[in-house]
Image (cartoon, rainbow, N blue to C red):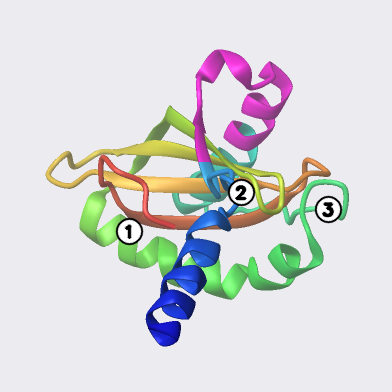
Amino acid sequence: MKKIFLLLFGIAILGACKSKPSTPKMAKLELSQVSPSQKNKAYELGKRVLNACNTSKFKPFTKEEATDKVIQNTTIERLSSTCRKFSIKYGKFEDLRLVEVIRNNTDESLIFRYKADYQRKFAQKELQVTLDKDNKVAAIRSTDWTDSYTP
């Protein structure tokens, strides 16, 4: 009888301990909630990278525009290699269309999801430009487009 009482008492105590509701790690923002300067910056920097495939010229990012990691990883050699693959498969890059902005609540960064338009329309590509809390490019990533965002 004592064991049953202690067991029920223990379950009651555990049930009474409620965890705090956690804030979601990612939150989709309305485009109107994002400042025009941030939208413009993400667009211009993303377009600069993809336009390099058309012109074979790339102006490297500065320390005011991007983090050290992005500056180190965005080399002319890596960009040329990616551009060759994209040009053969998709044709000439045309433009970017902003589809959604997602806030990462853990590090306060903004992920801008663009649909990248190319000459050949058989596949839809996505360009993700991540701006950190200091409005510097923290990541640039190209993938196949999906309607739902997966980090």
Q: Main secondary structure of the magenta part?
A: helix
Disc 2: which residue:
20
Magenta-span inclusion, residue 75: no
- Residue stretch in magenta: 27-43
Kindly report the distance in space between the C-alpha atoms of the residues bearing marks 3 and 1: 25 Å
Kindly report the distance in space between the C-alpha atoms of the residues bearing marks 2 and 1: 47 Å
Residue 87: which quarter of the image?
bottom left
Crowding at dot 3, Cα within 10 Å, few <14 / some 14-19 / many 20+, comes out as: few
Q: Where, quadrant-wise, is the C terminus in this rendering?
A: bottom left
What amino acid is labelled 3 in the image?
Answer: Thr
**N-term mark: 2 or 3:** 2
Q: Is residue 95 above or below residue 25?
A: above
**N-term mark: 3 or 1:** 3
Disc 1: which residue:
86
User: Which one is nearer the viewer's eye here, 65 or 77?
Assistant: 65
Kindly report the distance in space between the C-alpha atoms of the residues bearing marks 2 and 3: 42 Å
Q: Where, quadrant-wise, is the N terminus in this rendering?
A: bottom left
Crowding at dot 2, Cα within 10 Å, few <14 / some 14-19 / many 20+, comes out as: few
User: Which one is nearer the viewer's eye here, 68 or 20?
Assistant: 20
Disc 3: which residue:
62
Q: Helix, strand or loop at disc 2?
A: loop
